[in-house]
Amino acid sequence: MNAREIAKGIKVISTVHWERRLFDSLIPLPDGTSYNAYLIQGSKGTALVDTTDPELKHELLDQLESVEHIDYLVTQHSEQDHSGTIPDVLARYPKAKLVCSSKAKDLVLTHLDVAPERIRVVEDGEEISLGDKTLQFVYTPWVHWPETMCTYIPQDKCLLSCDFFGSHVATSDMYVTNKELVYEAAKRYFAEIMMPFRNMIRRNLDKLSGLEIDVIAPSHGPVYNEPDFIVDAYKDWVSPSMKNEVVLPYITMHGSTEMMVKYLVNSLADRGVTTHLFDLSVTDIGKLAISLVDAATLVVGTPTVHIGPHPGVFYAAHLANMLRPKLKYAAIVGSYGWSSKAIEQISGLIPNLKVDVLGTILQKGAPTEDTYKQLDELAEKIANAHKEDELVTTE
């Protein structure tokens, strides 16, 4: 993608990974992704903020062919998709200084083998002048690594936000034009990457609120020329408020667990509770993560494999524990053939979820009338708990 100007003297160089479908060998990318570098050309100096994934380095380097001199190469985050092409850029511009946060220095030295004399550490709030442009560095730790920072250009009220407010989506649009698409992509990004750090993100949002921002330019996805769109979304996602929703990931082997969870879904619906049902044998795990951002209750449905939960359920429970969503309640339902410790093992997998367990139902073989009665009782408990908390009903 050719470099494009988002303000006078500020260009985005977006390398678009249209075909990429998996990030970190873990995160699904249904819409691909992009990596944004920003070229700032002031009256007395030039800076490049971030680079690109090494796989697309030639696209970035080609766009820099006409740039004769770079004074500063700023790395806001040390992950390879941001910093992997730093050695190539430094080789092309031998007088450029690599600018990073204090905690990033060690990562730059160990991961990228940058010569120490080429590194300039900047502290929180420090500025570098490019003449008529100023780079002001704002530490935003744990968004989503400890060394992350943003770069603010006060003359243009432009925030280069790194992974903050990012969205994994491949697009030729420089600005957000399809808000529905970008909202879902940004929420997926938040759910998969940022959610475990939402308390730190809330503090960093407060920190950024002191800046006048007209444009937010993230490292992934299109630029926000209406910044309130994404800032308000983040405020909602990190808030303690939850919705009248249940997330129900499950797997079935011989049909018994599926009969139980689908009955429970209907029983919850009769009581005005929305359920997001995920068959883990075919689910996009990112969709499951998105649903966990707002829900109040997690119900896990599992058959028994050698007295324990199905491996797919084991993985989903581990994922939920790692993401630390703002759940308040949980329950476990499932089936077994001859013996089971599935409930005990699932409970042991989610210590990070500070939830009240509203019930556990484990059925030997196919569900009976008594099983369905227990499921109705569980649905009633969930609905009543949500009512007591005055949760917002999904429209």
Image (cartoon, grey):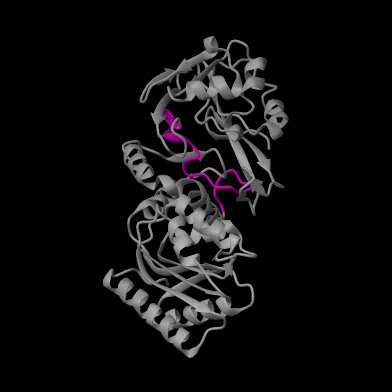
The quarter in which the C terminus is drawn is bottom left
Q: Does residue 113 lie above or below 377 as drawn?
A: above
Q: Which residues are magenta?
A: 149-177
Q: Is residue 154 visible?
A: no
Q: Residue furthest bottom?
A: 369
Q: Residue at x 48, y 25 (%)?
A: 104
Q: Dividing the picture into quarters, in which one does residue 274 lie?
A: bottom left
Q: Does residue 15 lie above or below 358 as drawn?
A: above
Viewer-nearest residue: 179 or 293? 293
The quarter in which the N terminus is drawn is top right
Q: Residue 173 in magenta?
A: yes
Q: Residue at x 59, y 43 (%)?
A: 174
Task: Say left or right for 70 vs 248.
Answer: right
Q: Residue furthest front?
A: 338
Q: Position of residue 200 (x, y in %)?
A: 36, 42
Q: Does residue 360 lie above or below 13 as drawn?
A: below
Q: Position of residue 208 (x, y in %)?
A: 36, 38
Viewer-nearest residue: 247 or 170? 247
Task: Say left or right for 266 vs 123.
Answer: right
Q: Position of residue 345 (x, y in %)?
A: 48, 60
Q: Position of residue 333 (x, y in %)?
A: 48, 73
